[in-house]
């Protein structure tokens, strides 16, 4: 399948795992081989680490492809994709490597599969130098879904440094294509909330100290909002010892920002809380619509979307510049960055604009049979007058927006030799809404 071969220098710009993740995902989606060299050349431990290897192996399986040179420490790999497949997949870093970064490389691929996929991701859920899983669920997910995607994340076990042991299951529905986003109006901050947690043998007091310090710091700048940061002790669903905090702010236009920090040995809990609070405030001050950690995560979806996307940001991070570089190298997407010049902008406010390539999912099945409702499968009457209900069949199909089911029954009437055929239709939408109707026909027996 892979007739085109790309080459990518893994040492340029940010020079870390992000180049690997974006390059590999775009390779799979476009069905083009890619050779990545000088992987993580600028890092203190260059080459592939276990979490990078797990991510590459995961998407290799998802696209039914081949992977050469992929071992821990390797500085060069070649990925040759086949056809994107849906299904159930497992990726395990066997370390505290971030499950959030595993999702970053696999989610774009799952969106362009033929049907729904379930990704079981194992490793660290709250790790340094990576988004906490809480950030992925509370910040990244609702904003990413503005592109028209739909996925769920179930945190089954939290895992901390150094052992990991966390487990997150992501269920992803495919798309035909991605829609562009327009996030240029920040609005007012209307809500601030979060969670401060401890796990394992660490005392609950640490959570309270982080929360109190964070609230005190935010209050210095934002005085008119109730700040709700819950203090939590994680016991049954946590592997290892850890503590940390994430604070989330929402705006009147649906923008979401966060600040977070993890505890370290020898660092006072109140300092952890202050660090997270200052990070949140920094990301609110620039009057952008996304924070510094969401910027780069949205670039690949902007590049793939059909149409022009616009995103208002604070200072452009090196990660974002790198993601744009990779996207432009491997697709025909065009990005423009300019200073925002409206009345709410300051010296740190920018607009990132992208003309996406409009990637379409050629793998998407028109009909995926699904018998999801026991009541429809049981042979029960459909509620139309008559007797001697005889179940004739029930079929259905799913697509990214709704599940449709069609039921058919045959009935013999009490009032003469007439047989009724009843066709029942039900649409189940992603938000839980249902629409049903029935059509009854009759013919003489």
Image: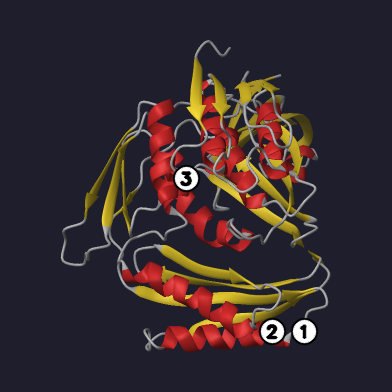
Q: Quadrant of the C terminus?
A: top right
Question: Residue 371 occupies which quadrant of the picture?
Answer: top right
Q: Is residue 284 left or right of residue 34?
A: left
Is residue 199 at least partly visible in the picture?
yes
Secondary structure category for the residue under label 2 = helix
Residue 187 in percent (x, y) is at 30, 68
Answer above or below: position of 244 versus 34.
Answer: below
Q: Please name the residue that numbered disc 3 is placed on.
A: 14
Disc 2 and disc 3: Cα gap in Å? 34 Å
Badge nearest the viewer, 2 or 3: 3
Q: Earlier in the sequence, mark 2 or mark 3?
A: 3
Q: Which one is closest to the eye, mark 1 or mark 3?
A: 3
Q: Residues within 10 Å of mark 3 (few under 14, many from 20)?
A: some
Where is residue 220? Give x, y as percent: 39, 88
Q: Residue drawn 39% across and 76% down? A: 190
161 vs 298, nearest the viewer: 161
Q: Which residue is mark 2?
A: 206
Residue 203's tag is 1
SS at circle 3 = loop
- Whether the residues at callouts 2 and 1 have beta carbons within 8 Å, the answer is yes
Q: CA distance from mark 1 to mark 3?
A: 38 Å
Q: In the image shown, does 436 or 244 lie closer to the viewer?
A: 244
Image coordinates of residue 96 in percent, x first then y, are 74, 55
Identify the residue at image location x=45%, y=37%: 12
């Amino acid at each position: 399948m892979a007739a085109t071969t790309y080459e990518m220098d893994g040492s340029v710009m940010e020079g870390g795992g992000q180049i690997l993740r974006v390059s590999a995902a775009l390779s799979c989606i476009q069905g083009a081989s890619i050779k990545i060299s000088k992987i993580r050349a600028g890092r203190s431990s260059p080459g592939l680490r276990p979490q990078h290897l797990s991510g590459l192996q995961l998407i290799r399986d998802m696209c039914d492809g081949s992977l050469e040179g992929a071992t821990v420490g390797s500085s060069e790999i070649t990925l040759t994709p086949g056809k994107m497949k849906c299904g159930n997949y497992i990726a395990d870093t066997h370390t505290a490597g971030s499950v959030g970064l595993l999702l970053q490389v696999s989610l774009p691929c799952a969106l362009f599969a033929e049907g729904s996929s379930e990704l079981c991701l194992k490793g660290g859920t709250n790790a340094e130098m990576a988004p906490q899983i809480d950030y992925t669920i509370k910040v990244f997910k609702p904003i990413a879904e503005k592109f028209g995607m739909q996925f769920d994340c179930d945190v089954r076990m939290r895992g901390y440094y150094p052992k990991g042991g966390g487990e997150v299951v992501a269920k992803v529905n495919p798309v035909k294509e991605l829609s562009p986003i327009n996030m240029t109006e920040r609005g007012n901050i209307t809500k601030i909330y979060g969670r401060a947690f401890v796990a394992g043998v660490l005392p609950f007091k640490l959570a309270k100290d982080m929360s109190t310090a964070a609230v005190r710091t935010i209050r210095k700048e934002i005085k008119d909002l109730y700040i709700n940061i819950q203090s939590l002790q994680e016991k049954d669903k946590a592997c290892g010892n850890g503590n940390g905090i994430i604070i989330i702010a929402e705006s009147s236009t649906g923008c979401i920002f966060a600040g977070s920090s993890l505890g370290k040995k020898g660092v006072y809990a109140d300092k952890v809380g202050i660090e997270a609070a200052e990070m949140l405030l920094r990301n609110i001050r620039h009057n952008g619509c996304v924070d510094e950690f969401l910027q780069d995560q949205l670039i690949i979806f902007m590049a793939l979307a059909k149409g022009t996307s616009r995103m208002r940001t604070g200072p452009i991070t090196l990660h974002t510049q790198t993601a744009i570089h990779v996207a432009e190298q491997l697709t025909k997407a065009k990005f423009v960055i300019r200073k925002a010049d409206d009345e709410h902008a300051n010296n740190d406010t920018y607009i990132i604009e992208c003309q996406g390539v409009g990637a379409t999912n050629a793998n998407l099945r028109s009909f995926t049979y699904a018998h999801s409702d026991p009541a429809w499968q049981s042979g029960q009457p459909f509620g139309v007058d008559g007797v001697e209900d005889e179940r004739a069949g029930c079929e259905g199909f799913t697509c990214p927006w709704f599940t449709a089911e069609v039921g058919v029954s045959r009935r013999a009437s009490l009032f003469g030799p007439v047989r009724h055929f009843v066709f029942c239709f039900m649409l189940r939408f992603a938000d839980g809404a249902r629409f049903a109707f029935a059509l009854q026909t009759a013919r003489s027996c």
